[in-house]
Image (cartoon, rainbow, N blue to C red):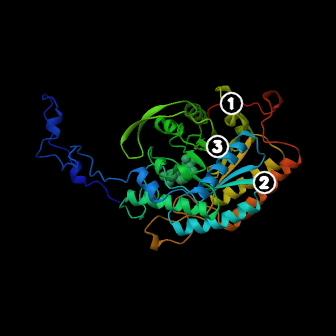
Amino acid sequence: MHAIDPKENEPMSAPSDTEPVRPADLLSPSTRPPTDSEGSGDPRVRALDPLPAPGEVLAEMPLGTARGDLVATSRREVRDVLTGEDDRLLVIVGPCSVHDPAAALEYATRLAAAARDLADDLVVVMRVYFEKPRTTVGWKGLINDPHLDGTHDVAHGLRLARQVLLGVLDAGVPAACEFLEPTSPQYIADAVTWGAIGARNAESQVHRQFASGLSMPVGFKNATDGDVQIAVDGCLTAAGEHTFFGTDTTGRAAAVRTTGNPDCHIILRGGRRGPNYHPHDVTTALRTARASGLHGSLTHGLVVDASHGNSGKDHERQAHVTRELAARLAAGEPGITGLMLESFLHAGAQKPGPLHTLTYGRSITDTCMDWTTTHHLLRTLAHAARQRRAAGRTSAPAPDSERRDDRDRVSLA
Ligand SMILES: O=C[C@H](O)[C@H](O)COP(=O)(O)O
Ligand SMILES: C=C(OP(=O)(O)O)C(=O)O
């Protein structure tokens, strides 16, 4: 990793107590670190590396008609599941992060075949996550550091991410991404069926604003401390019109004006206080959504993430949570429209490093279930969705008056 040279951050000789501190004292030409190449004079900016304009990258790698059709159809299917028009179960499944395009594409090929087999009961979307929000520091994903070596070749990362997404679509499976940088969607979002705003960003105005302009359904996660209200507020905010800072397709600064995104929903991912995938967590979250004045897909149901805080980032526990959720769905529990699973070719996780040092097909961020386990769980979930249908039940939540579990837990924070 490129750490900032500590010498650049050494304190300047401090002015005496009586002298007023002026910016010029701290940044006199003799003590000031070199300016960046653009001469902006921001002492903590090491460089401003130009990036290709979004329009340039899209022209190099156009989506094309066949892939565009897959994206449009799958977005509609996901929306219909979220609103209850379609009684299948949404399953967002795949690696915690993409670090090796070849392994991601092998996974996509396997998943596409499984998804085709189970299409009567499941709408399957692959996690193709290129941007990782970190608790403190760590590898921030393929876009930020595609060579996995701290060189942060973002221009290459953007192109590589788009290439991987197009390959995933060519394999026949739609893609899900978490969006982190406010302008990254412009390079890839046309190829994405479902988007996420993660637990560390769901409260961020910047993320809520750009979600309001995304053309696909977007899930907002509860906060890392378990607070679900921030996910509800995120959906509410993103549903409205916004004007915010961004760039146009040529990369020029622009005031972006959006129409609002009505296809947002909550994702329960557990938190520091423990898991939140139990029946009372689901009913409470949906009641919170309704109490906040939301309607449509948001209040019909939600997605449960079996990983992260719901499994303590333990892939064996994640499989157990998934089986538990499948049993509840099969028994007709309402309110769950989808599940999120973290899965890769091989189980577990390894420390990040340059590609040639890594075990093929194993996560370099959170632990994942292996393919065999995943495939089995997908069949279990399809069976659960079938049972739910056969019983003539839908995933629509029962009216408040019919609910026996009345514990109110609007916010876990
Ligand atoms: O999904 C991945 C991780 O949970 C998320 O990026 C945070 O990871 P960290 O706590 O290891 O930084
Ligand atoms: C970072 C992720 O999740 P969360 O925001 O729930 O930690 C993720 O799904 O990759």
* Amino acid identity at mark 2: Asp
Q: Position of residue 125 (x, y in %)?
A: 65, 54
Residue at (57%, 51%) from the top-left corner?
A: 192
Per the image, label 3 sits on a secondary structure element best described as strand
In which quadrant of the rendered image does the N terminus lie? Answer: bottom left
| Left or right: 392 in relation to 159 | right
Which of the two discs, 3 and 1, labels the residue nearer the N terminus? 3
Determine the residue located farthest toward the bottom in the rendered image. 356
- Kindly report the distance in space between the C-alpha atoms of the residues bearing marks 3 and 1: 18 Å
Per the image, label 1 sits on a secondary structure element best described as loop
* Amino acid identity at mark 3: Leu
Q: Residues within 10 Å of mark 1 (few under 14, many from 20)?
A: some
In which quadrant of the rendered image does the C terminus lie? Answer: top right
Q: Position of residue 42 (x, y in %)?
A: 24, 43
| Left or right: 156 in relation to 50 | right
Which numbered dot is residue 268? 3
In front of the other: 400 or 271: 400
As displayed, is residue 130 above or below residue 361? above
Q: Which residue is mark 1?
A: 295
Q: Position of residue 142 (x, y in %)?
A: 46, 59
Q: Which residue is mark 2?
A: 121
Q: Is residue 8 visible?
A: yes
Q: Is residue 346 visible?
A: no
As displayed, is residue 196 above or below residue 19? below
